[in-house]
Image: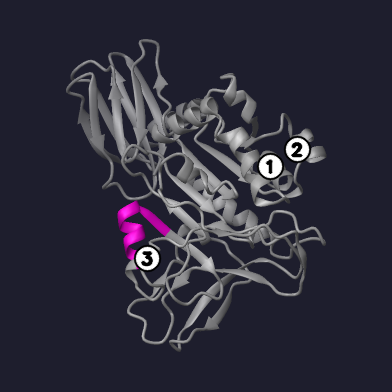
Amino acid sequence: MKKTLLLFLVCIVSISLIAQPSKVAFVSTFATLNDLQNSGDDDEYAAANWLVNTYGGVFLPVSQIKDNTADLSDYKALWIHFDRQSDETTINNEFAAAFLDADVKTAINDFYKAGGNLLLSIYATRYVVDLGRYDLAVELKGFGNGGNNPDVWYASPTWGTFVGTPEVFNKFTDPLYDGMTGVSYVTRDNGNIYPIIPFLGAGWKEDHNYFWNPQPDKANNDKYKQIDFENVWSTNSLATWAHVQDYFGSAVTRWNAKGDFVGKAITIGIGSYEWNQNSGTNVYQTNIEQLTTNALDELSPMGISTNLAFNNQDESSVVIANDVIKFENFSENTQANIYSISGNLIHSIRIKNDHHEISIDGLPVGVYLIETTKGAIKTIHKLIK
């Protein structure tokens, strides 16, 4: 009987998944992917082409956000990769013209505050400031025209490895670094060995950095430079330049939900994150793609969309956001059950009113099925936590 029930549940889930929205949109100032290829920056095109043709996302012209023909609730995450070969003033003006347009900024800010997620890379990292999520303008900037360089460029996931350090912060086990290859291990001044992650091999490099030295009121050897940034701003610093041994710099950062900002953002502003190496194939391109895959998988998880309600004919809905399940417009005493993917009943809920909420913060990471029974109608949704 259990096997039959499980098969029935899985079949319904498969039907539900077909109706889910596209996971990720690459937001571009160009009208089409072909226009970006023909008239835009090679790194922006390489990133967008990978998203559309390898990862499975969609190309979204910013003009469709401007004229309101795009419904951002169709997406779980937006990726803005703004990486251009020009001077600072020109780049800032081009970014502002597109993404600080009042209609565009309002739409993306509303999406972010409602639980939509953002991946912001290279010169787009500034958007967390423009949207009001952070109050310190980008201060570590690079607008290099490019040149040949024989070195491998790495990112370091560790801080505080100097002699006499009060505390080491090592983020290498963060899921963002799952699947990294070619990792090197270096002996730091404190005598211990730590990883550095290669992203850009020998050859032409553009050196486009755009990130922060957070908590600038604190010295680089003060561990609270790191601690306060994470605690006050609800962030995770995940990488800095490979040579750094103190607490300087947050070149890759996760911005967790905070205040009005229900969504999550990841910013990648380190110069080694170059999508197209002009002198030839980057031998570490797979790490750039894997890092991006990990970020987008985190920002656009399978299962129920961040802010999308799955409705039945009488407009009852199940919405999941920030480890809370919201049951909307169900009659009192409606039964709701949460099953493990193997069919075991984890939790049974009797809905008490038409806006019932339960926390799933305590559920272990895994795949679950949510079943609601309303009269003779049973609806199944899949949740990946």
**Amino acid marked by disc 3:** Gln
Query: How far is the residue under mark 3 from the one under mark 2?
Result: 38 Å
Instruction: Give the answer, above or below, for where 109 lies relative to 344.
Output: above
Residue 48 — which label? Answer: 1
Helix, strand or loop for disc 2: helix
Q: Residue at x 41, y 39 (%)?
A: 263
**Closer to the observer: label 1 or label 3?**
3
Q: Is residue 231 magenta?
A: yes
Residue beneath disc 3: 226
Q: Which residues are magenta?
A: 225-236
Q: Are marks 1 and 3 in contact (CB under 8 Å)?
A: no
Label 2 belongs to which residue?
A: 36
Query: Looking at the image, which residue is at 47% across and 28% down?
Result: 106
Horizontal and vertical percent for residue 339?
32, 38
Disc 2 to disc 1: CB gap under 8 Å: yes
Seen as rendered, the residue at the extreme front is: 89
What's the image's color scheme?
Answer: one colour
